[in-house]
Image (cartoon, grey):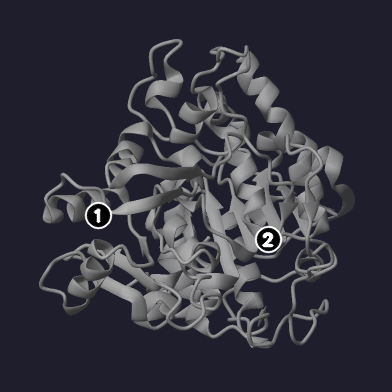
Amino acid sequence: MVRQTRSEGKSIRIVVTGPTWIAIDNVLRKLPGRLKPNEALLVRLKSTEAGDAGIDPVLLPYVVANTPSDGSYGQMMAHLDASQTVIVGATAQQIGRLMRSHGGEVGLFDYLLIDEASQMDVAYATVAMSSLVGGASVTVVGDDLQMAPIHPIDPPVGSEHLVGSIYDFFKHYRRGQTNDAGESRGLTPVMLDRSYRSNREIVEFVETTGYEKLTAEFPDLRTLVTPPFSAERPEHLAAGLAWSPAMAEILNPEHPLVAVVHSDRYSSQRNDSEAALVTSLVASLAGRLVNPETDQPFDPKTFFEKGIGIVTPHRAQQAAVIECLIAALDPDEQTADAIVRAVDTVERFQGQEKTVMFASFGLGDGDQIATEEEFLYNLNRFNVVVSRAKTKMVVVLSRRVADYLPKDIKALRHSRLLKNFVYGFLRTGSTFSVAGLEDLGECELRVR
């Protein structure tokens, strides 16, 4: 778009937003390597109270505090006021603050891109749209098969799209209306049918969730480890961490999709043995997982920033995994912060991508599973879990979670995705147990 307008002798002012900074930064961080010198002014806004922790290092040279006292703020505003080509990334809150500082009456941008639009509600999107000039264009990029915005109460029946996500709003916008020629005035979504993130096996499973004709641009992408794993316990693995020869098979790069189904029957939102198993697997990859950008193993901090992601349904299990990782790895302060950000709930993980992903359900108690069936088996939630991985996805769960039949008909239909993953899409590998993690009982390894 920048180059097209330049070729026409014009300029364009672009604003990129989304429900989280993670979603915004995922778009922005690819631009420095693609923009030519002096092609556009790139700005990543931040609040005046925020530090630089958590911002991708690639974007640090472009960070501007959203206040006139920041030295680079004036340059940004000069570009905007002069209608020069500029790309600004900001949350809706920061866009609103920018507009208030500017007077709020005259638009600043010609084009708005909303990424992860299925998770951004209409109210926040409206704030971002208030920054547009007359005749501006808007593109929303989203996926209604993934997580929607979280609201404290259900919306009125029939009005879900008015208070839900901005993606859903535009999907229903002017639906049923026709022009004078009898043609629909509604908007037809354009399906992007090529994944630039994941390998063939992951994409083939994601396709079964409702993405027709989805293909992988890099079908043979594999997890790179050096040296390769063997059945022998890794020399660098801390003495207190569990190991089993089966773990080498779990981490085998030729198995992009893995499920570990254990026999726990009592855990309720937190399973320390499951957290310990995930920690052993992650620690085994530490210092061996290769960063494809450098062809060298990830350094400890980047290992968790780009290499590893761990999702859990509950904060109790999130805390268990974080505690176990920090105790086992004894990281420095920066790496510890990266660990905390790398372990999160599904809702907060949407928009991220990692080389290797783990999911730890942390549940075995039948009554607790029954209480949370609608939450646990939400189709969109598990869809997010699997689609974050580039080369490998490992799901650790109890047999009770895998086998449970929800009583709610909607939850029952949604549970087919998890069941299909474990028992349909994956093939049986072997059974094993892990010394020191007897609470898990006999485990079944299923792979593809």
Is residue 96 rendered to the left or right of residue 181? left
- Indicate which disc residue 406 carries: none
Q: Residues within 10 Å of mark 1 (few under 14, many from 20)?
A: many
Residue 442, x across and y down, in percent: 76, 50
Tell me the element at label 1: helix
- Circle 2 residue: 197
Q: Nearer the viewer, residue 307 or 235?
A: 307
* Residue 163 visible, this orientation: yes
Q: Residue at x 35, y 81 (%)?
A: 61
Q: Nearer the viewer, residue 156 or 136?
A: 136
Q: Mark 2 and mark 1: span between their CA atoms?
A: 29 Å
User: For residue 74, what is the image quadrant?
Assistant: bottom left
Residue 170, x across and y down, in percent: 49, 29
Q: Residues within 10 Å of mark 2 (few under 14, many from 20)?
A: many
Is residue 433 rendered to the left or right of residue 412? right
User: For residue 125, what is the image quadrant?
Assistant: top left
Which dot, 2 or 1, sits closer to the camera?
1
- Circle 1 residue: 94
Q: Nearer the viewer, residue 82 or 411?
A: 82
Is residue 426 rendered to the left or right of residue 102? right
Residue 45, compared with residue 152, is above or below; it is: below
User: For residue 254, what is the image quadrant?
Assistant: bottom right
Residue 60, x across and y down, in percent: 36, 78
Residue 92, x across and y down, in percent: 30, 48
Q: Residue at x 14, y 50 (%)?
A: 100
